[in-house]
Amino acid sequence: MCIRGAGLIGLNANPIFFGLRISNVDASITEVRRRELLKLSPLALLAGFALPGARSRGFKQVQGFTEAMLAKLPRGLAPVFDRSELTPLANFPVNAYLTEDPEVDSKEWRLAVEGAVEHPGSFSLADLRAMPKHEQITRHVCIEGWAVTGSFGGVRLRDLLAKAGMDPGARFVEMECADDYYESIDMASALHPQTLLCYEMYGQPLTAGHGAPVRLQMPVKLGYKQAKHLITLRVSRVLGRRRGYWVDQGYPWYGGI
């Protein structure tokens, strides 16, 4: 992950709009909505150059509105790559929120699923491994400016949410981590077929540096959204006060590629 996080720029043929890859499948619909969002640019400028007291507030209002609109745009699949295009694991950067390993015992580890679900509970690593496994070779892009192509394996987040009986009216998934990091994502991204609770990289169990025993892996999001060392998933209708460690310091909440 880069800063704990990844990526800012798109590295494929699909166009990028405000950090979001636009799917060719829905291009005509998306183009109309994109033009509508572009009309917001003057508002952002006005907010930025207004009186000092309103400047910060104006930017935050425009940013929040834009992110809400982006969350509603059609989202396609992120590109997948061939094994010949893999970045060697040794060259996959490790960025951490803390310099120290949180020292999670994989045998004792549990992932709590709570909030707006019918069946709250906890899942062991063995429980997740017993569910259908999905593997993908996708791009991991960092807001620091680097990007790599990695191999990831795990269970789809949407499968776990379905197993827990997610409230169909829920809009967010909030995450807590063993190293005190925290993050939240929109439900459309949580249910995306390429969003994984990743427990393997390159066919091997995650190392501590890469977020063992389980991390979020989302090729449609920037890396700082991809929380490591997960211990709690909270399904909610209303986003809590703690939106994300870096988000609460000014990073965009949506964080899409």
Image (cartoon, rainbow, N blue to C red):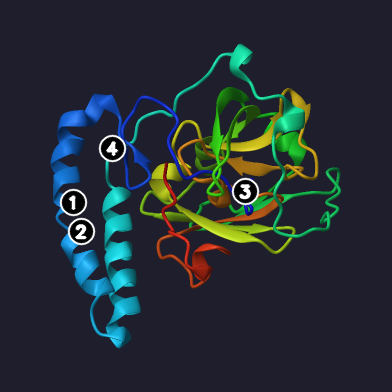
At label 4, counting other C-alpha atoms closer than 10 Å, the crowd grade (few under 14, some 14-19, many 20 or more) is some
Q: CA distance from mark 2 to mark 3?
A: 28 Å
Which of the two discs, 3 and 4, labels the residue nearer the N terminus? Answer: 3
Instruction: For marks 4 and 1, give the CA distance.
Output: 17 Å
Which one is nearer the viewer's eye here, 43 or 79?
A: 43
Which numbered disc, 1 or 3, marks the residue that appears first in the sequence? 3
**Three-letter code for the amino acid on which mark 1 is drawn:** Leu
The mark found on residue 41 in the picture is: 2
Q: Which residue is mark 4?
A: 74
- Give the structural element (helix, strand or loop) at label 4: loop
Label 1 to label 3: alpha-carbon separation: 29 Å
- 180 over 137 or under it: above or below: below
Q: Earlier in the sequence, mark 4 or mark 1?
A: 1
How far apart marks 3 and 4 lie (CA) works out to 26 Å
On screen, residue 82 versus residue 88, left or right, reads left
User: At 74% from the left edge and 22% from the top edge, which residue is drawn?
Assistant: 203
**Residue beneath label 1, please?**
38
